[in-house]
């Protein structure tokens, strides 16, 4: 059977009908034609009839239990049809905007007065065809951009926006499972966070944890979790309406995330993506109303100070234990341990600058101080020790060597800012 003998537009229609009938499809695969008979027999209990040149859906598609298989024989035809259909609907959409004097950069939906048929082009054709296209070719940037454009346009008037957000999450997860480290899909997912409700942000943090733990080499999923936490900080600052939540709730989730990332750091040696995510946890905690300033001594009542000081020293002890674990470099040929140690040492130089002085004192007096100094000099990062020596001296610190507690704050501040 020749894949070019079928009607490609009819194939696309069948694919889109399958996607519409089961919006919960979260697993996609491309299947060799010889496997279809076995799959259908396993699913239906009867073998698939011999394929013909007619455009039979069972010949090219298999769907069961939120899984979708597409015949490799149909991929070329499907891609061409999906691209043509998407570009055609997108061109008509742009013509619609041009006819009303609207530009791509400035869209005021309230002035459009569009008939329902025109809105259907935006919500149905563009979104429908772009969905099929990104499933077939996940790096098609124009399709992703068009989805964001449409969602932004309808966000203020759409009654089922949260359902759209959920469907977009399922779409991204399907593509991420099929195409690892897909930047465009994860970038789209991060963009959608700004339209998520508080409940959806919490749910995404919990549901994405297991997948992230299995794909720690994919920095994109860690960036996504960072974006979710930043969204929580933004909501916390607003703290208005029925969707608001308390600072205590955020603080609890922050501690859970911190503990979870620490477990991953111990388990997966040398994964550089875990380090920046770990830094961002502290950075966003400082950005919230639960600022680390609450740990500073001499503020508030003595009872509150005692509680806060106890929490501070608990945090300090936990971080020192993690540092001790990460700076152990076995004598073997694997470089991951040394990479892990460098990441850890740099993080603690950064943390010492952020925390109140008791942390720096504890670190200076610990046996780990010499290890950090030796490690940073060995790896050519001695500038982290010297960069703030003058600042430390200006603050009247006891020993000039405490300059080793300083770090390249600007470097990691920029890194954190970029992830925002």
Image: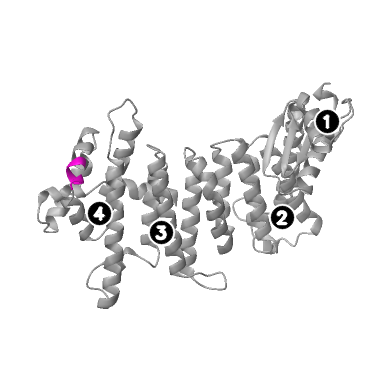
Residue 59, disc = 1
Q: Nearer the viewer, residue 203 or 409?
A: 203
Instruction: Single out the mark in the foreground, 4 or 3.
Output: 3
Instruction: Single out the mark in the foreground, 4 or 1.
Output: 1
State the separation of the CA atoms marked 2 and 1. Answer: 45 Å
Disc 3, SS: helix
User: Do tag 4 and tag 1 residues touch (Cβ < 8 Å)?
Assistant: no
Disc 4, SS: helix
* Residue 200, above or below 382: below
State the separation of the CA atoms marked 1 and 3. Answer: 51 Å
Of the numbered discs 1 and 3, the one sitting upstream in the chain is: 1
* Residue 353, above or below 303: above
- Magenta residues, start to end: 367-371
Of the numbered discs 4 and 3, the one sitting upstream in the chain is: 3
Q: Nearer the viewer, residue 257 or 96?
A: 257
Picture coordinates of residue 328 (x, y %)?
A: 27, 38
- Residue occupied by mark 2: 100
In the picture, measured across the screen, residue 169 lies left or right of residue 285, that is right
- Residue occupied by mark 4: 353
Q: Nearer the viewer, residue 97 or 205?
A: 205
User: Do tag 4 and tag 2 residues touch (Cβ < 8 Å)?
Assistant: no
């Amino acid at each position: 059977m020749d894949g070019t003998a079928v009607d490609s537009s009819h194939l696309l229609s069948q694919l889109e009908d399958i996607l519409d009938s089961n919006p919960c499809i979260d697993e996609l695969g491309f299947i060799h034609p010889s496997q279809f008979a076995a799959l259908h027999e396993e699913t239906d209990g009867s073998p698939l009839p011999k394929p013909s040149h007619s455009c039979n859906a069972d010949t090219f598609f298999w769907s069961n239990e939120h899984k979708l298989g597409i015949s490799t024989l149909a991929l070329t035809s499907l891609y061409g049809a999906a691209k043509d259909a998407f570009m055609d609907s997108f061109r008509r959409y742009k013509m619609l905007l041009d006819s009303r004097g609207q530009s791509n950069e400035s869209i005021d939906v309230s002035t459009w007065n569009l008939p329902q048929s025109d809105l259907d082009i935006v919500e149905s054709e563009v979104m429908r065809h772009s969905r099929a296209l990104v499933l077939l070719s996940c790096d098609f940037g124009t399709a992703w951009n068009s989805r964001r454009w449409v969602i932004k346009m309808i966000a203020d008037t759409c009654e089922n926006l949260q359902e759209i957000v959920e469907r977009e999450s399922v779409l991204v997860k399907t593509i991420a499972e099929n195409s690892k480290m897909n930047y465009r899909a994860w970038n789209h997912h991060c963009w959608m966070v700004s339209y998520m409700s508080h409940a959806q942000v919490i749910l995404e943090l919990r549901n994405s944890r297991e997948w992230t733990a299995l794909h720690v080499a994919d920095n994109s999923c860690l960036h996504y979790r960072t974006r979710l936490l930043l969204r929580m900080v933004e909501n916390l600052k607003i703290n208005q309406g029925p969707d608001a939540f308390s600072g205590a709730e955020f603080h609890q989730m922050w501690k859970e995330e911190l503990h979870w990332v620490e477990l991953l750091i111990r388990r997966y040696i040398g994964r550089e993506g875990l380090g920046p995510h770990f830094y961002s946890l502290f950075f966003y905690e400082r950005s919230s109303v639960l600022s680390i300033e609450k740990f500073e001594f001499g503020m508030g009542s003595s009872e509150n100070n005692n509680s806060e000081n106890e929490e501070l020293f608990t945090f300090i002890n936990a971080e020192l234990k993690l540092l001790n674990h990460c700076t152990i470099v076995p004598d073997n040929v694997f470089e991951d341990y040394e990479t892990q140690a460098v990441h850890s040492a740099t993080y603690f130089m950064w943390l010492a600058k952020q925390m109140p002085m008791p942390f720096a004192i504890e670190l200076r007096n610990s046996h780990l101080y010499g290890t950090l100094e030796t490690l940073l000099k060995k790896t050519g990062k001695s500038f982290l020790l010297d960069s703030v020596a003058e600042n430390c001296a200006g603050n009247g610190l006891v020993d000039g060597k405490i300059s080793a507690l300083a770090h390249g704050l600007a470097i990691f501040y920029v890194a954190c800012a970029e992830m925002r």
